[in-house]
Amino acid sequence: MMVVGIVDADLLASGTRHPNLALLKIAGFLHDNGVNFELIFQPDADLRKYGVVYMSRVFTFSPEPDFYTQASPDIQARFRKGGTGYYATLTGKAFREAREADMAALENDTFLMTLENKRGGIRKHGIDMARQMPFYGLYDAFVAHRLAMGDKPARMAAYKDFSMGFLTRRCVRHCPFCVNRLENGVVPYSKLEWFHDPSRPHVRLWDDNFLAAPYEIWKPALQMLIDRRISVSFQQGLDERMLAESPHGEEMAEMLSRARLHGDVIFAFDNWKDRDTIERALLVWRKYNPTRSTKFYLFTGFRQQPEKRDAFWRDVWELFARIKVLMKYGCLGYVMRHEDYHSAPLPNIYTQVARWVNQPAFYKKQSFFQYCYRNQSLWEERNLPHLHRPTLKTFDEFMADVDAGFYKTTARMTQPLRTVLDMLAMFPERRDELLDMFNTRMPPAIKTARWMPGFFVPARNARAMAARYRRRVFLTSAATLYRRRLSFAKHRAMPRLFPHLVAILHICAPASLVCQLIRRPRR
């Protein structure tokens, strides 16, 4: 019996942590029809046993696997290739033709057309990509292999814990770097039950621009997710600008505040020219979601060329400016580099900024320069422990070490710090501006008054947050007072603190308990 091969080129190139949805649906269609199939994930796989092989590539930087490029013409003829990775960087008519052919390829595939469609709709034969239920067991052998190799189960969560699909397709923004740049409107695509596996705890939606759909599309879909208590993530990100531009922006934010959103809520801030709209939208978002972890994709590095220093400077400046806006509202960033960044005059600056921003533990606590210097001090701790150097230094202290020749005679300078110096050397006339960018850090930049209780917070949220705050203050204060056995008469600070303490505590604790805790004598 013929076996069908399935190849995820991005997986073989270690370019993704997510299953390929098109391949999952092909596997589901073959499973419905009792056709044997296998995911080919070993680089040295023997292809002779496969009658047909479906290979998908999402990213243009993922190479085709060697077992395909080095195969005989007879073996290569068995492959059916598709995915955005084969045409995303094309332009003009070539892109349009490749896009249209790719979107229709599977539903017109000659082999799949010989099999019956068992998922309803008007098609009797061939796969209906909108209705087809994915076969989520496709990657099980790969997951078992990676776990046996020592990978942590959390790394495999996308393959084990999520259903995947689209509720809507297309977009309205026409971004020049996006594969949806030719689309003019958002349309409904699948129903949740067509791809939702109830045994999996979460749903991952890949909708291109869910909030840009007409009101009669996005609202019932979002209300359905709320009513069914579905744990959902919008992996492509939501369009934050719609909260400011749509007449239903506040309703969107309020409904999202009631949804079971898994992990960070992801938006996108791809263009600096949208900053005013983004800030207006953030005020709406924080009105209903004052404490929810929020992340923004930060697209950068597009159309970079080695000789265009001014365009490079503008791109880097805008990246840091967007980061500063996000910090002001307590939001995380996630830098997404277009492959053109490799052609920039100093491409490593994009790499280092991405490593800083994309790791919240660094982004929340350190400036970019502090992150770069901490990378240096970690190297020194491992290789020169006898020096007992400080873990962080200011830029002036670092430059004093440079001038003293420390990095020529005693230690080597790590790449992040070299990149900082290279950037300063490339733009000496912008030194002060660069140092201001490099030293921006999250804590001083946050304007908490914009979304803490009392600032555009609905009554329901405000009451709940205030109650949590009072309980936290009460428990912390009461435990501290009890532990120290303080007496009001003996503790000098208490006359100043007493009125404020009682004002906070009387709401959430009996007066007798408060007085007992405060007046308990020291033994």
Image (cartoon, rainbow, N blue to C red):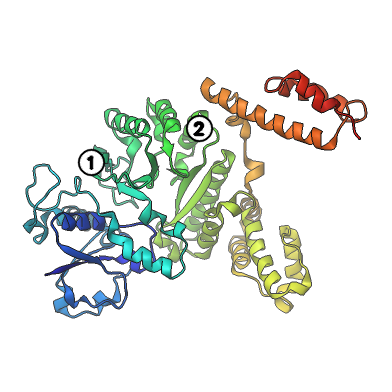
Work out whether residue 93 can be spotted: no
Alpha carbon separation for disc pair 2 and 1: 29 Å
Q: In screen coordinates, is 112 left or right of 523?
A: left
The quarter holding residue 377 reads bottom right
Q: Is residue 207 above or below residue 244?
A: below
Q: Secondary structure at mark 2?
A: loop
**What residue did someone put label 1 on?**
189
Q: In screen coordinates, is 290 left or right of 391?
A: left
Quadrant housing the N terminus: bottom left
Dot 1 amino acid type: Tyr
If you read the primary sequence from the N terminus, does the residue marked by circle 2 or circle 1 appear first?
1
Q: Secondary structure at mark 1?
A: loop
Please state the horizontal and vertical placement of residue 216, each as a whole percent of the image: 27, 28
Please state the horizontal and vertical placement of residue 317, each as a whole percent of the image: 54, 51
**Residue at 38%, 26% in the rendered image:** 248
Q: Is residue 339 above or below residue 255?
A: below
Please state the horizontal and vertical placement of residue 198, each as a whole percent of the image: 31, 44
The quarter holding residue 112 reads bottom left
Out of 32 and 209, give the one closest to the viewer.
32
Quadrant housing the C terminus: top right
Work out whether residue 53 can be spotted: yes
* Marking on residue 82: none
**What residue did someone put label 2 on?**
289
Q: Is residue 384 above or below residue 354?
A: below
Out of 123 and 13, give the one closest to the viewer.
123
Q: Are marks 2 and 1 in contact (CB under 8 Å)?
A: no
Dot 2 amino acid type: Asn
